[in-house]
Image: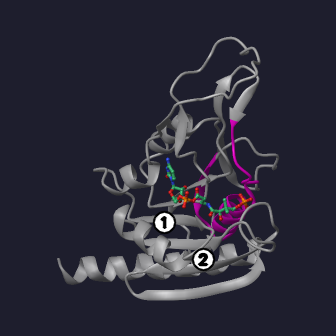
Amino acid sequence: MSTGDLCGLRIVVSAGTTYEDMVPVHFLGNRSSGHMGFAMATAAAARGAEVMLIAGPVQLATPEGVMRTDVRSAAQMHAAVFAALPCDIYIGAAAVADYTPAQVSASKSKKSDGPLTLTFVRTRDILAELAVDPRRPRLVVGFAAETDDVEAYARDKLVRKKLDLIAANRVGVPGSGFESEDNALLLIDATGTRALGPAPKTQLAHSLLDEVAAGLKRKFLDADRHG
Ligand code: PMT
């Protein structure tokens, strides 16, 4: 039987990049390696949670005791996350594409000397939809990848997407964000802002779960107080 402070909780974690196919040979992806999300899944399972990991195309082994669904595109990740409901906590660590090509060509396009113009359309926002779904997890936790004004942009995402907690990290600098083994997080919720790290992602995952567990406890207390 599982033991640990997250025992009895079902947690869904998304991790890694998504690939948006344009033609059979080209796709739109990003630099997410999956390390942050896999570290979250590993830490949650080690603390007794039942963990479902929804992974984009990454080169990482499945953590011990974790269930995994592999997806390729933002649309597939959206479908896999909603198929994994109900859960108590959703942690969106994946770098999901915000845009996908309006049309996918069935054949490889021929080069010409002129510029190439492609039209992209918005993908569905998994986090924002989950936060207002009737099956909303008790805690919806997002990440924010920002190059500047990290706190302000992350706070805007917390409010706009109706999240309980957001973990913001700076990208585009060495030692944090994409691909790096280490990261530094700014945690923002209704109670304020805390800085975590810099530290290895494996360690930060546990610190972030401490905050998640505390957030869940606060929600239970609030729910009790308000009947
Ligand atoms: O994978 P690594 O190499 O270890 O890098 C870790 C990381 C930098 C990818 C990770 O720490 C991180 O910041 N993940 C979120 C990246 C991101 O896409 O951030 P965003 O600010 O664009 O999106 C905000 C939130 O909305 C994220 O929780 C994202 O999962 C979610 N989102 C975005 C678009 C979309 N269509 N659906 C979503 O749910």
Relative side of 61 to 5, left or right? right
Q: Position of residue 223 (x, y in %)?
A: 26, 76
Instruction: Tell me whether circle 1 and circle 2 mark residues in contact (CB < 8 Å).
Output: yes
Residue identified by numbered label 1:
141
Identify which amino acid the numbered label 1 is placed on: Val
Which picture quadrant has residue 217?
Answer: bottom left
Residue sitting farthest toward the front: 114
Quadrant of the drawing holding the N terminus: bottom right
Q: Residue at x 74, y 83 (%)?
A: 198
CB of mark 1 near ligand 1 (< 8 Å): yes
Q: Earlier in the sequence, mark 1 or mark 2?
A: 1
Instruction: Determine if residue 8 is in view.
Output: no
Compared with 12, 197 (above or below) is: below
Instruction: Determine if residue 159 is in view.
Output: yes
The local secondary structure at tag 1 comes to strand
> Any mark on residue 208, and which?
2
Relative side of 10 to 110, left or right? left
The local secondary structure at tag 2 comes to helix
Magenta-colored span? 28-54
